[in-house]
Image: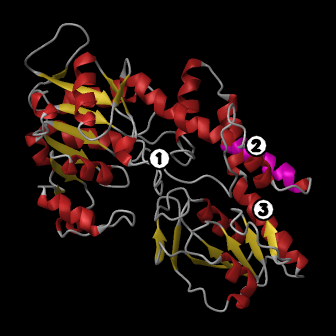
Amino acid sequence: MTRLENRTAKIGVIGLGYVGLPLSLLLSEAGFKVTGFDIDTKKVTDLEAGRSYIFRIPAEEIQSARKQGFQATADFAGLSEMDAIIMCVPTPLTEHREPDLSYVENTAKAAAPWMQEGQLVVLESTTYPGTTEDLMIPILEAENRNGLKVQSKGTVAEQGVFYVAFSPEREDPGNTTVARHNIPKVVGGHEEIATELAAVMYEGIFTRSVRVSSTRAAEMTKLLENIYRCVNIALVNELKVLALKMGMDIWEVIDAAATKPFGFHPFYPGPGLGGHCIPIDPFYLSWKAKEYDFNTRFIELAGEVNEAMPAHVVQYVAKGLNQNKKAVNGARILMLGMAYKKDIDDLRESPSLTVIELLREQGAEVQYNDPYFPTVGRGRHYNLNMTCTPLDDLGQYDCVLIMTDHTDYDYKDIVNKSKLVVDSRNATKGIKSDKIVRC
């Protein structure tokens, strides 16, 4: 506790992606001695050389952290020297839309042999209530070499124990309005000591920690946050489809409703959900709910609505092409934006990937432009091997499809030079042209 309070503790962060790397840099900036662990040796090599692989994190931040003692490694043996270990690994869905906890499981198995007495272990990966206690703790207890047990609820043990907590990540890539350190950190320990240790550690880099009663409460908090957004986005997506049929502009309606100073928070429609949270996390809870013979009808309905949005976009591409006496089959289409939201280099679960597949299935020739992705290769659910196409001679395409409203784009110029523009993001707001089809 003393080392955490005076920031002399050594902290290991496992998983140096969109969550783990920013967290490592915050910890290092606060004075903690931070070591990042990752099985991706390219990430390790880049960080050790002072290079960044995330667009919103400049290389200067990596180099500054290196001067503060930050280092990266693929050798998990170094975990034995840490006071605290934070796990930031993916929790995707399987092909059958069930939780894939293999990353959490494998990380726990990799860390357990190196664990030492008194260490704090915190899981940040979004998951269903019970993962920390039912999956991670048994692995850590069974596979550590020192016969350690998790500190139990009740009698305090001074020897032979380690401490476990859950603290959900709250990353919002591209958000420049809220400083990362101003985002409160929810913390729930397996017991009270773990809660306090984790809370004090996070208070070294965040303005405050929000202590909850258990790891399960902390796990559920993260799911509630994302389900709230998922359901409300589904609502406006459904209303968007209705508004289009009624000849109305749903964005105008939302902006008008948002002037109400109470009881309304604006959400905006789009071509589908993306990112590592909202398209995935609600299904973790709906899957877990079946264990209790409970149907999460709102979650499942919201999922159906949001998952239908890429097909809705393709339908309007076909509608626009049809107005120009063109078929989807054989059409040349340039997609603007691969990232799941504007001004970031994050491709995870992006609806653009699905739309490309759907258009290709109908015989379209699809190319893309995105200033954040020179190439798009292979991921868990796609294998595109595409290269960014320059914004030259837009008139050669039968349709320019706006999937991500990056601020780098000059939308007025794009409309002027294109035969047809299908806008799924309201990026052409205020531009009047018969070439535009808004969806």
Q: Amino acid at mark 1?
A: Pro
Q: Are marks 2 and 1 in contact (CB under 8 Å)?
A: no
Q: Amino acid at mark 3?
A: Cys
Residue visible at 18% across and 36% down in the picture: 84
Q: Secondary structure at mark 3?
A: loop
The residue that disc 3 covers is 439
The residue that disc 2 covers is 257
Q: Quadrant where the N terminus lies?
A: top left
Taking the image as shown, residue 256 lies to the left or right of residue 342, namely right
Q: Amino acid at mark 2?
A: Ala
Q: Is residue 433 above or below residue 182?
A: below
| Place of residue 227 in the rendered image (x, y in percent of width and height, measured from the top left) | 58, 36
Residue 359 in view here: yes
Membership of 295 in magenta stretch: no
Dot 2 or dot 3, earlier in sequence:
2
Q: Is residue 301 above or below residue 191?
A: below
Looking at the image, is mark 2 or mark 1 nearer the viewer?
Answer: 2
Taking the image as shown, residue 321 lies to the left or right of residue 38, namely right
Q: Secondary structure at mark 1?
A: loop
Quarter location, residue 315? bottom right
> Badge 1: few (under 14), some or many (20 or more) residues near its Cα, within 10 Å?
many
Quarter location, residue 213? top left
The residue that disc 1 covers is 92
Region rendered in magenta: 233-244
Dot 1 or dot 3, earlier in sequence:
1
| Place of residue 108 in the rendered image (x, y in percent of width and height, measured from the top left) | 26, 38
Residue visible at 90% across and 82% down in the picture: 325
Q: Quadrant where the C terminus lies?
A: bottom right
User: What is the distance, in whole Å, between disc 2 and disc 1 at their CAs?
Assistant: 35 Å
Q: Nearer the viewer, residue 378 or 231?
A: 231
